[in-house]
Every structure is written in structure tokens, then in C-alpha cells.
Amino acid sequence: MWTPSSAGDWLAVSLAGVASASVIAGFAIIGGPGKARDIQQDDARLQAVVSTAEALNCYSRGVGPLPDDLETARQAIADPGSAARLAEGCSNAEWKDDPITGEPFEIRHLDNQHANICAVFARAGDGATRGYYFGTGASYINAETARPDPGPFCYTVNLTAEPG
């Protein structure tokens, strides 16, 4: 078994100890790879929610009130020649599903001016966008709304807001 015998050996052992302690402290402070993955997935999920909120707004402004069967609205958004896509600011509108699960978001029509779009988030959110660009769709929901707990959360979509 090796034992440190010179000052250089002791220095090497000390530096290895400091490096190990730094790595452990880093994981304790910022979390490990699981936390980073959850943050990344929640950011992607929120981006898809914002995109779908924009699509809902485009449908509402271009066609009219949301239909009971939202597949009709989804198809209109997919058609570049539809009234929904020809509405002002809607040429690039895209209806998205949850990018992690592949499942459609839960969307509830509240009235002719509002809908809820709900997703399941891995973490609570403080509302900070961390500088990410959400595009014009972010003006149709308050993407900076804090999510108090992990799990299901619904954003309210303004279906009649004009692009800003």
C-alpha cells in the first residue's frame, strides 16, 4: 500500500481531496444530472405549451371560437392555407404535443376569450424564463407564472389577444 512520504505526495493527496470535496459540494448545491434533465425537459415542455397557445390564439382569431373537437383546430393549424394560419402573425403557428411523452396537452375551452392548456411538469417553477426566447406565443399566456409544485399545471390562454 502506498503512503505519502514527501511534501509533493502530501500536496497531491491534498489536491485530490479538495477536488473530490468540490465535486460533492457542486452536486449538493446545483443538483445532479437528474435535476438538470428535469429542468431541460420542463423548459422544452413550456416551449411547446407556448407554441400551442399561439396556435389556439391563431385559430380563435382566424376562424372563430374553439370547436368542441380540438382535432378540427389542430388540422386547421397544420394547413398553411387555412384562415387560422392566414391570421395576422400566424404563418408559422404550430400545434405541439408534449415533447417528452408525445401525448397531447390537456386543453379546456373556458369561454370565447380563454382556454386552459395543461401539462405535467417535473419541478416547481419560479416563473423565471432564464432568458429563453419563447417567441410571440408567450404574449398569449403568462409563461412567467410561477408553478408552486411539481405536477399538473394549467396556463390560461388569451384567445383574442393580437400579436404583439
Image (tube, rainbow, N blue to C red):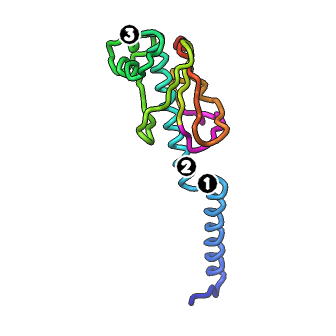
Identify the mark nearer the N-term, 2 or 3. Answer: 2
Which quadrant holds the N terminus?
bottom right
- The crowding category of the residue bearing disc 1, from other C-alpha atoms within 10 Å (few below 14, some 14 to 19, many at least 20), is few
Q: Is residue 148 above or below residue 64?
A: below
Along the viewing direction, whichever of 30 and 13 lies nearer the viewer: 30
Judging by the rendered image, the residue that carries numbered circle 2 is: 36
Q: Which residue is mark 1?
A: 31
Label 2 crowd (10 A; few <14 / some 14-19 / many >=20): few
Q: Name the amino acid type tagged 2.
A: Ala
Counting residues from the start of the chain, the first of labels 1 and 2 encountered is: 1
Q: Mark 3 or mark 1, which has the lower sequence index? A: 1
Query: Which residue is depicted at the point 54% across and 47% down?
Result: 38
In magenta segment, residue 14: no
Would residue 24 be found to the left or right of residue 137 on screen? Answer: right
**Residue 164 location in percent, x, y?**
55, 14
Q: Secondary structure at mark 2?
A: helix
Say what amino acid the circle numbered 3 marks: Ala
Where is residue 9 shown, x and y percent of the image? Answer: 62, 81
Q: Indicate yes or no whether the magenta region holds residue 129.
A: yes
Q: In the depicted view, which residue is nearer to us: 116 or 89?
A: 116
Q: Please report the bounds of the magenta region as a residue range.
A: 120-132
Query: Which residue is depicted at the point 47% across and 32% down?
Result: 105
